[in-house]
Amino acid sequence: MPTAYFNPPECRRHDMGEGHPECPERLAAIDDWLIASGLSQALEHFDARPVDLKDVELAHTHGYVSEIGTMLRDCAEKGERCAVDPDTSANAHTWSAALHAAGAAVQATDLVIDGRADNAFCSVRPPGHHATRDQSMGFCFFNNVAIAARHALDVRGLKRVAIVDFDVHHGNGTEDIIAGDDRVLMVSMFQHPLYPYSGAVPKGTNMVNVPLPAYTRGGEVREIIEAMWLPALERFKPQMIFISAGFDAHRDDELGQLGLVEADYEWITLKLKAIAERHAQGRIVSVLEGGYNLHALSRSVGVHLRVLADL
């Protein structure tokens, strides 16, 4: 079966202003790289539908969904930009982009569970892993991966899923949502201290958090993954793996100071794919988070996808 690829055009219309690192050009750079490398032809492209708000409320409170929905729809109606926090703002297209980003993650989950794709990658924005149960922050509105994971559990009936987060920033929103849910194992690594200045003390026993000092290189990261992530994943035996695929731990990315390169992302993806093949029928849904150096981002997504697609 193919690797499913979601790249909703609605996600390119969300724009937080000139000079903002979380920009529409991120998705364009990925798409251009996949076309130029020929990899795009090896993927099966799918259109995304807007997420059902019932799925969103599996991860977020009803009050938050209503509040942020009202704010973003108001922005759309007025055609004005509105500030959500010092780092995050919305324009007229943000509500649609957020619905399609989460919708892609849920739709990818269904495709993979139904056996219509081996695995999937969602090239979407806004990202999600900083969005907590009841707060948007850090460029994020809806927690795409947490919504998809809860959909797999609560709607599709899986018993155990893993969430893997290798973004340079701690996925505090995902941790807030799934802490204490023994159906979910979350393994993550992140630079610390760095925004959002959390994660050193996990919120639940279903977390394997690995804070890394600035300038940690790929070799050290691989040793840590071998020692901490992989044994935990093997013991847990997930029936599906969700990846918060942030590529801002790349050495060329200015929003962090870690030292990963494309070969490290390839190695990490190979290790996760092997876990999925042993325990989860190969089922992986990977969703884009960070990654702000356009060249490093596109190359890193490329090697990630080559592994997922067995190319």
Image: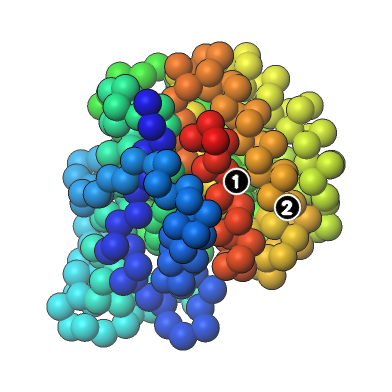
Task: Measuring from the top left, give residue 52's x and y in whole percent.
Answer: 19, 45
Is residue 187 in view? Answer: no
Q: Residue at x 35, y 54 (%)?
A: 7
- In this orientation, which residue lies closer to the viewer: 150 or 23? 23
Tell me which amino acid carries mark 2: Val
Mark 2 = which residue?
Answer: 261
Task: Measuring from the top left, give residue 265's x and y in whole percent.
Answer: 66, 44
Task: Measuring from the top left, give residue 120's x and y in whole percent.
Answer: 41, 37
Packing grade of label 1 (10 A; few <14, some 14-19, many >=20) is: many
- The figure's colour scheme reads rainbow
Q: Is residue 288 above or below residue 227?
A: below
Residue 305 shown left or right of residue 224 in the figure: left
Q: Which mark is residue 303?
A: 1
- Mark 1 near mark 2, Cβ–Cβ under 8 Å? no
Q: Residue at x 47, y 18 (%)?
A: 280
Task: Measuring from the top left, give residue 26's x and y in whole percent.
Answer: 48, 66
Tell me which amino acid carries mark 1: Val
